[in-house]
Image (cartoon, rainbow, N blue to C red):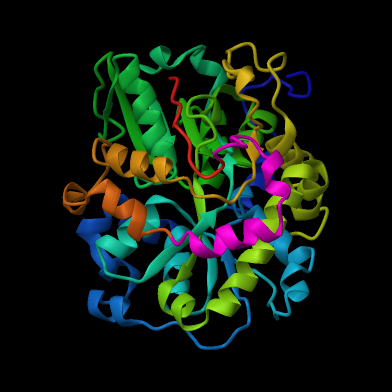
Amino acid sequence: MSDINHNSDQLSEEELEYLQNYEMSRRDFMLDSLAMGGLAAAGLGALGTSASAFANLQAPEDEVVRIGYLPITDATVLLVAHAMGYFEDEGLKSEKPTLIRGWSPLVEGFAAGKFNLVHFLKPIPVWMRYNNGFPVKIMSWAHLNGSGVVVGKHTDAESFADLGGKQVAVPYWYSMHNIVLQMALKHVGLKPVIKSQGEPLAADEVNLQIMPPPDMPPALAAKKIDAFIVAEPFNAAGEMLAKGKMLRFTGDMWRNHPCCVVCMNENQVNANPEWTQKVMNAIVRAQDYAQKNKKEVAHMLSRNGKGYLPMKAPVVERAMTQYDVTNYSQPPAIQHPEWGSGRIDFQPWPFRSATKLIVDQLKDTLVGGDATFLSELDSDFVTNDLVDYRFVKAAMEKYTGWQDAPGFDADNPFDREEVVSL
């Protein structure tokens, strides 16, 4: 990683100020800790909404596309569809996307009808629909891969086995990051635990803590944590600004896994299928454009371009394009180059097999709070009930560039076998 200066363990004043300028507010972090750290236990009271009111909220009837998003590359296709005028090409009006700095405020805005098109970590709609009865539907995937495990230079960690007795930050309990990390830790005989910072750890324990993504690089540089797992561009920021090193890309552990998904209100989908189809047409076009023009899209999204994301162009570009075995040999962050994956990739189809695996793995993942609602979920039922396959498939039939994206079998494009190699 020749473009990273490893001469100092500490962030420079300029780098630290740069990161801290884009931290989530304390209110956002507290909301996320409540809502995502103990979803079932904290319930909707943590979001300032009663469960009954939450379940009965109706989608607005207007047809203006109103996007809410977090400033991460997971939101790329929503932002590209807006920036490239794809909604307008479909005859739709669209407002400027609204940047939200926490998952809980985004959930609130979506539930209240402020936004009618959002991206969520895939476990969020699982919680919303089955724990709280909100009519959310997954309409497509937002991206593939796009996350990694970054370790501090001070750890000398070269593998997951070296994380025993360490402090590791995850963005939310109910996230793909937490699922994949715990799968890897258990694979090497380590035990994920949730303890207070001062509590002693056994040699085979790894202490997990929730931390907002913008806080992760500064915390790593200050040695407050030993590693983190998160979405881009904060892994790139951890490398370039916090002198960290990539331990493993998650897309190299679970081939072409989903993370964030595109969601709508089921009431609005059913009330206006024509509008829904036009929105999904724009999203599928954006998937294809983002996959084939990653460097251009990275600049477009950055603060040097249209400013959808607060990071500078070099950080976003690294987050979307830097993925080669030579630069990531120490530690070996890419062990399956034959998979043909990118650091982040884009394709819209929500494979049923992946949804089933997510629900099954969630049941065996340690989280803060009460997760009893998961024990009653049947993964086959969720696979058919949570996801609406109709509109994305029709859009893919109209705009066919997605066949070139990773992970598709030309003879059987809408089914696949999940490949996990920890």
Residue at position x 32%, y 29% from top?
207
Q: Quadrant of residue 163?
A: top left
Q: Is residue 62 visible?
A: yes
Residue 354 position within the rendered picture, expressed as x and y whole percent measured from the top left? 42, 41
- The residue range painted magenta reads 388-412
For the point 34% across and 29% down, the residue is: 182
Identified at 70% across, 31% down, the residue is 240
Please name whichever residue, 168 or 220, is drawn nearer the observer in this view of the structure.
168
The answer to whether residue 204 is magenta is no
Name which residue lies at 58% across and 13% down: 332
Residue 26 visible, this orientation: no
Q: In the rendering, at what x and y percent does residue 40 appear?
A: 23, 57
Q: How many marks?
A: 0
Residue 129 vs 1, above or below: the answer is below
Classify the position of the N terminus by image quarter: top right
Q: Position of residue 38 (x, y in %)?
A: 26, 53
